[in-house]
Image: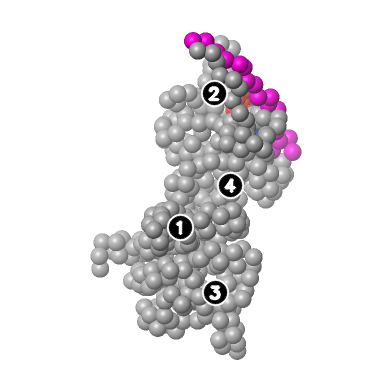
Amino acid sequence: MNELQTAVSERAATAAPGPRRVVVGVAGSIAAYKAPFVIRLLRQAGHQVKVVATESALRFIGAPALAAVSGQTVSTGVFDDPAAVEHVAVAEWADLVLVAPASADLLARVRAGRADDLLTATILTSQAPVVLAPAMHTQMWLNPATRENVAVLRERGLRVIEPDSGRLTGEDSGPGRLPEPERIVSQALAVLQQEHRRGDAVEEGRGGLLNGRHVVVSAGGTREPIDPVRYLGNRSSGRQGCALAAAAAEQGARVTLIQAHVASELLDALPPSVSVIAAGTAHDMLHAVREAARDADAVMMAAAVADYRPVSVPATKIKKQAPAGAGRASGPMMSIELTANPDILAGLVSDPPRAGQIVVGFAAETGDDDGDVLFHGRAKARRKGAHLLAVNAVGEDLGFGDVPNAVVVLDAQGSEVARRQGSKKEIARLLISLTAGLVNGS
Ligand code: CTP
């Protein structure tokens, strides 16, 4: 056993006691040749595997190879053995459904709820978590149709692993490569581990502070278009929001992260149980947050939402005015008329999508001639009325990006509840435990 395989089986040992049953779906992609490696790693980690391949997968890899490596016959069609109602039997057997590779066509069919072969019918029937590892050409991965399919699938709670970037089948390269089998298996095992922990906690009536709760977190900075190539943005990285999402998931919550322009490395590092929804502008975020918050126990607004947006956005690029004359410091003036965006946080307080939900905000402050960071924070706490407001100082070297943070947490009256200095992860854990206390009424 090599180092990687040892790591995977060690992880499996802590992931879930005893063998688990994994349906490995294989769709039609050139990367289907890597499926046997995924199957072998799963079996070496002690799990049982049943392979369900699509017709087109079998054009890339033979059923005998898949059967040999999985130790079971390979099923394809819903009507291979109608009396056995195989899609129901397979779906009920599975503790996890892992599709590697998942082609663009498979993602589209699953999104549409199709059930025209055994794999899609199994996914539609199964109550087990579903992990999809896409592999396709970069243009197909980046096509809006696929982007939308992936977003909808994630919204529905299916885990879609980000593909790797690199050399594709042809000369070109970009995102769309099937991740290495080790990454696929370790992400799939992480999902099993999480489900296992959640199951145990529910059975024993203990566990995470947010077991069975739904937490919505917003992260990143919105961008308001000025014209087709320019936007008004801010320096938020989304790190604090991602840390909050991870800390909420750690406490057993179902988490929906509404992200505006968060780097894909940060999104990739999230626990697979976090559903991610993209919302690029303040308006997109308003709709996405309110929709997700309809059944949420807590909503945490860590996103830096633009307060204003251009009144009108031309369909064509705005051209530069005549340049300044030689030696003149300034040329013709240019101005963009702005209009206020809705205040999402204040709206959640005044008109909550679900009665009794806990609302948490952030206040990014620099302090000015009128008062220091905390003075402005207290005023904002009273103005916004969120149950908790985490006030932090921001500036060139403070608050944004991969830097430590210091926050003072205030209640809706502006009174101090807690203060903490530390990494974004530590701040996130503090805020999640304060929020869980309010959600659980303690
Ligand atoms: N926020 C929001 N909608 C907006 C602006 C901000 O929901 N249109 C939320 C942020 O997500 C954050 C909190 O309000 O949780 C405070 O954001 P901040 O930028 O500090 O405050 P502003 O309301 O924008 O006030 P100002 O810029 O004047 O400090």
Instruction: Judge whether residue 379 is colored magenta.
Output: no
- For marks 3 and 1 on the same chain, the one whose residue lies earlier in the sequence: 3
Residue labelled 2 has its Cβ within 8 Å of some atom of ligand 1: yes
In this view, the mark in front (3 or 1)? 1
Q: Residue 213 location, x and y as percent?
A: 60, 51
- For marks 2 and 4 on the same chain, the one whose residue lies earlier in the sequence: 4
Q: Please indicate, yes or no, whether residue 200 appears anywhere in the rendered image.
A: no
Which type of secondary structure does the marked residue at label 3 adopt?
helix
Q: Mark 3 to mark 4: distance in Å?
A: 28 Å
Q: Which amino acid is tagged 2?
A: Glu
Q: Which amino acid is tagged 1?
A: Gly
Q: Which amino acid is tagged 4?
A: Ala
Q: Which quarter shows the N terminus?
A: bottom left
Crowdedness of circle 4 by 10 Å Cα count: few (<14), some, many (20+)?
some
In this view, the mark in front (1 or 2)? 1
Asked if 220 appears above or below 324 in the picture, the reply is: below
| Residue at the spot of label 4 | 278
In this view, the mark in front (2 or 4)? 4
Q: Residue 62 location, x and y as percent?
A: 41, 80
- For marks 3 and 2 on the same chain, the one whose residue lies earlier in the sequence: 3
Q: Residue 335 location, x and y as percent?
A: 64, 21
Q: Residue at x 59, y 85 (%)?
A: 79
- For marks 4 and 1 on the same chain, the one whose residue lies earlier in the sequence: 1
Q: What is the number of the mark on residue 365?
A: 2
Q: What is the number of the mark on residue 176?
A: 1
| Residue at the spot of label 3 | 119
Residue labelled 1 has its Cβ within 8 Å of some atom of ligand 1: no
Give the image quarter of residue 123: bottom right
Give the total of numbered labels.
Answer: 4
Q: Mark 1 to mark 2: distance in Å?
A: 40 Å
Q: Which amino acid is tagged 3?
A: Leu
